[in-house]
Amino acid sequence: MDIQKISSRRKMRLGDLLIAQDVISQDQLKVALMLQKDSGKKLGEVMVDEGIATEDAIANALSNQLGMPYVHLIGAQIPETVINLVSYSIAEKYVAVPYKYDENNANILWVAMADPMDMAAIDDFAIITNLQIMPAVATRTEIRLLLDGYYGVANAQSVADQYLKERQDMLEEEEITEADVSDSPIVQLVKNMIEQAVRQRAS
């Protein structure tokens, strides 16, 4: 797949693509566009929410029309060195996540995207990682589940670490023991969140 060909599709519209792939009709597109104006959501989200098209049908159509791989992320094991190339805020903003380096070129990074025609996302990922970005198609739901699984652990650990630091700074002033801090409800809650996320990632 040539990245220049991807760039040439910058003006391609999702609705026209789905009609070309017989996923939706012209009338359904008109309804979805009307609903989109009121919702502020992306067209694909509106279609899924309103039952006009499924995430899988949209992803398959994008894959077929654009010549991109359709990747399934449920149960995927992504190296932390790869997923940590971008922050959670960027991944969540674009609903996109890096998942592997190209097998034949370490300067190419594969990114699973709900909207692989989003050239702004591709450009930002390229700038942030200093790598050439090769987009693949994935469903919005699977990307968000994966982000929750990976970044959720990191975010929860960050909260726990900050809490522990603040409480330990107060030990001398409040006669609180380290055991009291470690056994506090918030720390126990975060520990449970992390353990659950790790078990889900391993299953």
Image (tube, rainbow, N blue to C red):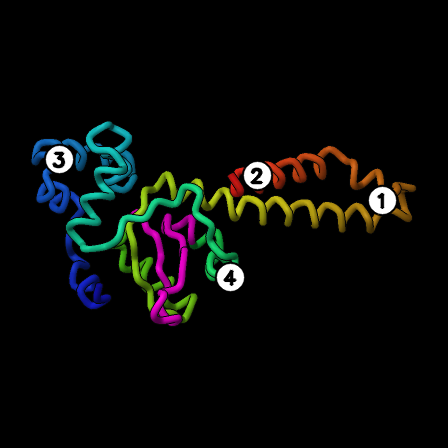
In this rendering, position of residue 152 left or right of residue 94? right
Q: What amino acid is at disc 3?
A: Ile
* Residue bearing mark 4: 81
Which disc number belongs to residue 146? none
- Judging by the rendered image, the residue that carries numbered circle 2 is 199
Of mark 2 and mark 4, the one earlier in the sequence is 4
Disc 2 to disc 1, C-alpha distance: 27 Å
Quadrant in which the N terminus appears = bottom left
Label 1: element kind:
helix
Q: Looking at the image, is mark 3 or mark 4 earlier in the sequence?
A: 3
* Badge nearest the viewer, 3 or 2: 2
The label shown at residue 24 is 3
Q: Looking at numbered disc 1 in the image, what kind of residue is underneath it?
A: Glu
The mark nearer the N terminus, 3 or 1, is: 3
Q: CA distance from mark 1 to mark 4?
A: 33 Å
Q: Position of residue 185 (x, y in %)?
A: 73, 33
Q: Are marks 2 and 1 in contact (CB under 8 Å)?
A: no
Determine whether 27 is above or below 174 in the image: above
Work out which residue is located at the far top of the displayed protein and give it: 51
Q: Are marks 3 and 4 in contact (CB under 8 Å)?
A: no
Q: Amino acid at mark 4?
A: Thr
The foreground one among 62 and 126 is: 62
Q: Which is in the foreground here, disc 3 or disc 4?
A: 4
Q: What is the crowding at mark 2: few (fewer than 14 residues within 10 Å), some, or many (at least 20)? A: few
Residue 48 lies within the magenta run:
no
Q: Which residue is mark 1?
A: 178
Label 1 Cα neighbours within 10 Å, binned few <14 / some 14-19 / many ≥20: few
For the point 11% across and 45% down, the residue is 16
Cα–Cα span, label 3 and label 2: 39 Å
Count residues near mark 4 (Cα–Cα under 10 Å), then give few for <14, some for 14-19, many for 20+: few
The alpha-carbon separation of the residues under discs 2 and 4 comes to 20 Å
